[in-house]
Amino acid sequence: MKAEIIDISNILWQDVLQQVRHDIYQLPEYLALEAKRTKTIPEALLITEGDKIFFVPYLLRNCNDVEEFTLSDIFDIYSPYGYPGILVNQEAMTLDFLDAAFKNFQDVLKSRGICSVFLRMHPILNEQLLETCLSSNFTLNGETVSINLKLSEPEIWAHTRKGHQSTINKCKRLGFTARTVSFSEYYKEFTEIYEETMNRVKANQSYYFDDDYFNQLLSLQDKLHLCIVEFEGEVICTSLFFESCGIVQAHLGGTKNDLLSQSPFNLLLHHARLWAKERGNDYLHIGGGIGGSTTDSLHTFKSGFSRQRHKFFTLRLVTDEEKFIQLVELRAKALETQPEILLQSGFFPAYRYTVN
């Protein structure tokens, strides 16, 4: 079994993507823009044995980025925004190989001073992996929703909640129209509506992105698409979508405040799923509630477009317990609390716990 750390310029990265079905979140271009946004280092750990492939893309972060820490030789890794998970080819889908690969994964990271791992697993691509590898390190966070594009258009419509059907038909009667356009051409309209939406919902700061980030998205070229809804010549609703290997992912979107009550986003998603189906894709993945919740209004809205669900798991792994506890103790001291309180909070890694 061979294990090697590779950076985004390494030809092996593209070699893996040519052999394994993947999503946008594993592309080196996507890791690069996320690394720039988060001031981290984009890497991947590639483990191979014969024709078996185990590939983990991630962002490397120095633990001195929390001001209380002065330890420059301790790191952790986490996923870029979205669902990168772990790429494994069909030949590698055996319990023996996966167990050995996970052990090797932990050993390599520990040897590099990495004390913890937080990865968001891919709800679609990692289904078989999660069924094969029954690791206690995987945490079930909830579920996500996708639209099965292999169904016929009448079946897709029949799987849509009656309330959503009525809203879509109402939007059409009002004269709303939906189409797919170039992101670069409608960049200004998108960013203005997105910021207006985040301000309206009082979103967490992590959901705000600057112009540099949106400009870098253009590097994804034909894998990036923008859907809009227009009314009387004005863009009133918009959303970005990624497309890779038969999987279309809803990314960021929003609706203008003054037409929010008309729910044009219903029409946008309806258009997006028919557009994605026409292009021969298998899934339109629209995600779940906040943090994978199955009870909030966001999940309720999304679940009205499809009956297809996926379990959403995260991998939470301590690779160096001594260093991990050391950081927890430092963080607890800074917050004037006990380490046990942080460890029992459910937040991972506990040393990055913040008080709301």
Image (cartoon, rainbow, N blue to C red):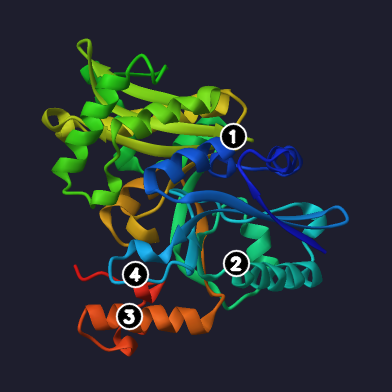
- Compute the Cα span from label 1 to label 3: 42 Å
Of tags 1 and 3, which is closer to the observer? Answer: 3
Are the two marked residues, 4 and 3, in contact with CB atoms closer than 8 angstroms?
no
- Compute the Cα span from label 4 to label 2: 20 Å
Is residue 293 something that shows in the picture?
no
Q: Which mark is residue 112?
A: 2
Mark 3 surroundings: few (<14), some (14-19) or many (≥20) residues within 10 A: some
- Compute the Cα span from label 2 to label 3: 21 Å
When asked about the image quadrant of residue 97, the answer is bottom right
Q: Which mark is residue 29?
A: none
Q: Which mark is residue 352?
A: 4
Q: Which mark is residue 244?
A: 1
Tell me the amino acid under the disc marked 2.
Arg
Q: Percent from the top left, x then y, of residue 345?
A: 32, 79
Name which of mark 4 and mark 2 comes first in the sequence: 2
Of tags 4 and 3, which is closer to the observer? Answer: 3
Q: Mark 4: which secondary structure? A: helix
Q: Which mark is residue 330?
A: 3
Q: Percent from the top left, x then y, of residue 39?
A: 40, 48
- Compute the Cα span from label 1 to label 2: 32 Å
Q: Nearer the viewer, residue 317 or 264?
A: 317
